[in-house]
Amino acid sequence: MSDRLKNKNVIITGASGGIGAQMAILCAERGANLVLLARSLDKLQELQADLLRRFSVDVFIHKLDVSDTDEISAVFSEVLARFGHIDVLVNNAGFGVFREAHEANVEEIKGMFDVNVVGLMACTGMVLPVMRKQRSGHIINIASQAGKIATPKSSVYSATKHAVLGYTNSLRMELGDSNVFVTAVNPGPIETNFFNIADEKGTYVKNVSKFMLKPEYVALKVVNAMLRPVREINLPRWMNAGSIVYTLFPGLFEKIGKRAFNQK
């Protein structure tokens, strides 16, 4: 097991469950100090107690709704004052709602963009000056395969993830000479509570259950890449191969894949 993360300071948003919690466990196992942020304070407290019991690391938790940029500024200012040096930021907080475009209301659209895009950018903006000054660090943005291939009933969610990928790719070039790494993580569907909101009817989960990724597997791939110059993590690989074909032959891909896309 690599000791690359030993005594490093890692911030994870959306850390109360799913891959966020799994990443926290793996980072603590490798000796990293943690800043865990999420809306569910009770779940964070349970996770903190478990990690402190099992590992000799510092675990700081704070309630945070990343759709509130004022709250982001206040919480990250507190974190920076406490830890100073920030090595890794994982922008993991996010949510989606699967609806056809004409059914999506404006509040829902704003909500998804506020969390998935603006919140991610605001969190990143808080640590960038520190990482630039220390000339080291790693920004990891949890995007989605939906950011590469849009599908029916995910127009808004896909749009937010396209935005995340655009931001991530630009940021990587901006930080090219600063020794700060930038990674986009593009998973397919993962077995988490994400679908309790996104897929109210359970249709999508039922249709793609055999393809769903385990959160432990995704978390391991991300943690293994921390503080390494990894451009993208695409899971599963066959799904990413589809996105490459889609880029080259979009019309043909949409025509042939029409049935496969309509799983929601």
Image (cartoon, rainbow, N blue to C red):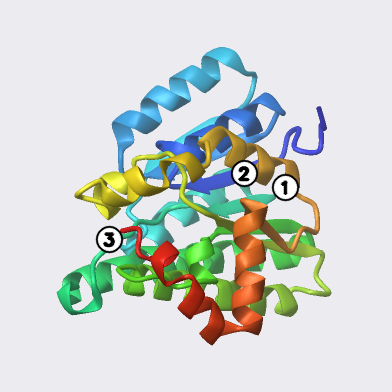
- Can the viewer see residue 184? no
Q: Residues within 10 Å of mark 1 (few under 14, many from 20)?
A: many
Near mark 2 (Cα within 10 A), the count class, few <14, some 14-19 or many ≥20, is many
Instruction: Give the amino acid at mark 3.
Output: Val
Label for residue 226? 1
Where disc 1 sits, the SS reads: loop
Q: Secondary structure at mark 2?
A: strand
Pointers 1 and 2 in contact (C-beta within 8 Å): yes
Q: Residue at x 81, y 32 (%)?
A: 3
Q: Residue at x 65, y 37 (%)?
A: 220
Where does label 2 land, which residue? 10
Q: Tell me: residue 202, above or below residue 53.
A: below
Which residue occupies the foreground of this view, 226 or 60?
Answer: 226
- Residue 56 image position (x, y, % from top left): 64, 19
Tell me which numbered mark, 1 or 3, is placed earlier along the sequence. 3
| Residue 166 x %, y % | 57, 78
Q: Quickly name the residue at label 3.
A: 97
Residue type of the residue flagged with mark 1: Met
Number of residue marks: 3
- Up-down: is 178 above or below 74? below
Measured as percent of width and height from the top left, residue 170 is found at 65, 80
Q: Nearer the viewer, residue 7 or 240?
A: 240
